[in-house]
Image: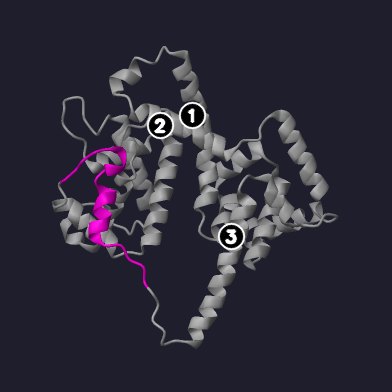
Amino acid sequence: MKTLIVEISRIRQMMGIIESIEDDKKISDEYMSYLRNRSIDDQLNQTNDNNYQELRIKASEAGGRLAQYEKIENATSLDELINLFSKDWEFKDYVRNNFCGDEEIDGIIEVLCIFSGGSNEEYLGKERCNWHRSVFSNLTIDTNLLDLIPGLKEKALKLKRISSTNKIKSNFETTRPNIEKNKQSISADQYISKLNYSDVGYNNVDTGGSMRKYAEAISKEDPNEVESLVKSLISRFKDLMTTKVNKEISRAGMSESWAYWDVGKQLYFYNNPEESNYKLGNPLTDESIQQTIINRMIGWEVTNGGKKPNGDKYSSKELANIGETYI
């Protein structure tokens, strides 16, 4: 197996498709820094600048790669990693085009399943699993397969350690039922700073009204779950803007606040249905609600801030419908 992996790595290197995550982040940061420091008019005046166009193309390509890397980085369990390689077709296509073939992907799933203590039949299906075993009948499945994809081995080993630690902790807590668990929390006041677009330089001092209600709704949830969801929404949004919409993201779109805002809004109305004509659902668990949030932001971007040609504003539902047409 080690010989096979070395040969695959050598071929990838010859083809020039070994990317550096840090280099890609540097390219994206450079491009985003350019956008933040210039007005829309300045950006439009640069369309004939070859250096600007080259930077934009590089940033678009780097963004596409980073969107896939972030899926690995943002995984919070071995099951999430396994699902990436078994059920996320966009991710699998990227891996196929850049790193390895289906046989190696199945091998990676098997390694991850060994880490998690589960069976890969759940993810590959019994028939494909038997085929995979026949293909690898003379090979030893080991962790070297994870080296094919940048950052995967480190992430998988970290999640494996966390999983083992959680099992030990769970067993300990079972024997000590009277020990009160420390529950992490973030106050509504702390969430205000995540809702006011201050991370992109806006100075929104109105901390009452809807902002307060949504901040309070988020503060009642597990902050780790909220942060994980927000990062996932932003990653998926940026990926779609790059690969499907092909439109530069606005200053507001570069903020995390839109995601926190809509998650808070959905949570508030989910818990106060009498105040809403929204499609209700818990955004932390309902994937259709999560996709609607992303679609709505795409709709907002492509309509230049949610404005109709006559100056009126699109409704949230209209924006979501517009965004859905790009998916």
For label 3, count other residues whose C-alpha is less than 10 Å away and answer few (under 14), some (14-19) or many (20+).
some
What whole-number distance in Å separates the C-alpha atoms at marks 1 and 2? 9 Å
Among all residues in the image, which is located at the extreme right? Answer: 138
**Magenta stretch: includes residue 202:** yes
The percent coordinates of residue 256 (x first, y second) are: 34, 45
Q: Are marks 1 and 2 in contact (CB under 8 Å)?
A: yes
- Kindly identify the amino acid type of the residue bearing the numbered disc 3: Lys
From which residue to which does the magenta span run? 183-205
Residue 184 higher or lower than 245, as above or below: below
The percent coordinates of residue 74 (x first, y second) are: 49, 52
Mark 3 sits on what residue? 158
The structure residue drawn at horizontal position 67% and vertical position 40%, both measured from the top left corner, is: 99
Horizontal relation, residue 77 to residue 298: left or right: right
- Kindly identify the amino acid type of the residue bearing the numbered disc 2: Met
Foreground pick, 121 / 18: 18
The structure residue drawn at horizontal position 72% and vertical position 48%, both measured from the top left corner, is: 104
Horizontal relation, residue 17 to residue 309: left or right: right
Which quadrant does the C terminus fall into? Answer: top left
